[in-house]
Image: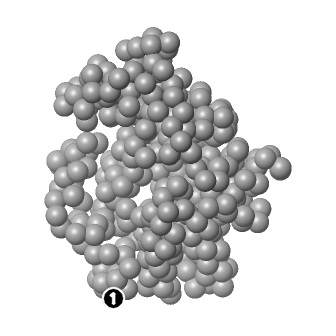
Amino acid sequence: MKYLITGITGFAGPNLAKLLLAEGHEVHGIIRSSNGREYDLLDIMTVQEIESIKFHYCDLKNEYVVRKILKDENFDGVFHLAAQSHPPTSFREPVLTWEDNVNASMNLITALEGTDTKFMFCSTSEVYGDSCKDIGKLSVDLPLQPSNPYGASKAAIDLYMQERMDNGFLNGYVTRAFSHTGPRRGKIFSISSDASQIALMECGQQKKQLRIGNLKTKRVVIDVRDCVRAYYLLMKEDKSSGKVFNVCGNDVHEMQYYTDLLISHSKFDYDEIEQKIYEPYYRPIDIEIQIGDSKELVDLTGWKPEISISQAMSDLLNYWRKKYFKHESL
């Protein structure tokens, strides 16, 4: 099969590309410019893997170029992962967030209407807002109540997708991914920030003081490789078309738990690292708890997380060690 990944140089994108290549598929990716960014992927991909991908260079907000690529290549499926996906940034840059997440998505959807190409829109658990604290596990049939501009931008396309699919204009499905982490997660995100800082401490570039945000919020966190495996299983499954799926594990913990796990995988004793509240890491509006119900995904595909969260934390820390140490993990 021939697949296109938007956001292929981001976080989930290269992890999905590795999976698709391993499964024997033809993989294409869209990036904004031909400035060598392809080889940024060497932190988790081999040269052979990167050179197996056909890259297309365009801004997804350029409707003409997007249409041309999709028409010329006639993909079997498109995984739309590209987005401005950092909620705190969305408070500072709401217009940019809307342009990247809504306008670009509209170009892809409009270009694919009436074609056989199957389209996956990567939505987010942020579309539910803080509903979980009142009703418990979040199911896909709940009303969308985003509490930040990022969640609102995703909710707009999430709802538009449902209208297009319900009325027969588009062959696609929506995934609402809950918290996930792992190799290539940007250090502006809480867990990866902790891992990056600990790796810096280990190589003597940061004193043993960990800058943290709100570690009292509760999340179910899975490994990104389990997350993209769900995306792929749904793409292969004919019965996923026209539907919405939560992608979420089962074990909920305070964010402190994940920080503690990272420290346990470090070379330091727990008490050696001072944890210090850093106000810029707090969101203007934070979501107290998020737990999703993945029943639709599990019933259709049999998916379940296979990588333990402890292993995910270890792999994430090793990712940052390699970045800073320039050699194999400790």
Q: Residue furthest front?
A: 279
Q: x and y percent of residue 55 in the render?
A: 24, 66
- The answer to which of 244 and 145 lies nearer the viewer is 145
- The answer to which of 259 and 106 lies nearer the viewer is 259
Q: x and y percent of residue 301 in the render?
A: 60, 51
**Mark 1 is on which residue type?**
Tyr
The residue under the point 47% across, 79% down is: 103
Look at the image and tell me whether residue 166 can be seen: yes
- The answer to which of 42 and 210 lies nearer the viewer is 210
Task: Tell me the crowding category of disc 1: few under 14, some 14 to 19, or many 20 or more residues within 10 angstroms, Cα based.
Answer: few
Q: Secondary structure at mark 1?
A: helix
Q: Identify the residue under disc 1.
A: 64
In screen coordinates, is 64 left or right of 122? Answer: left
Q: Could you tell me which quadrant the C terminus lies in?
A: top left
The residue under the point 50% across, 45% down is: 280
Look at the image and tell me whether residue 223 can be seen: no
Q: Could you tell me which quadrant the N terminus lies in?
A: bottom left
Residue 151 quadrant:
bottom right
**275 w.r.t. 77: above or below:** above
The residue under the point 55% across, 80% down is: 170
Q: x and y percent of residue 19 in the render?
A: 37, 49
Q: x and y percent of residue 219 in the render?
A: 64, 40
**105 w.r.t. 82: above or below:** below
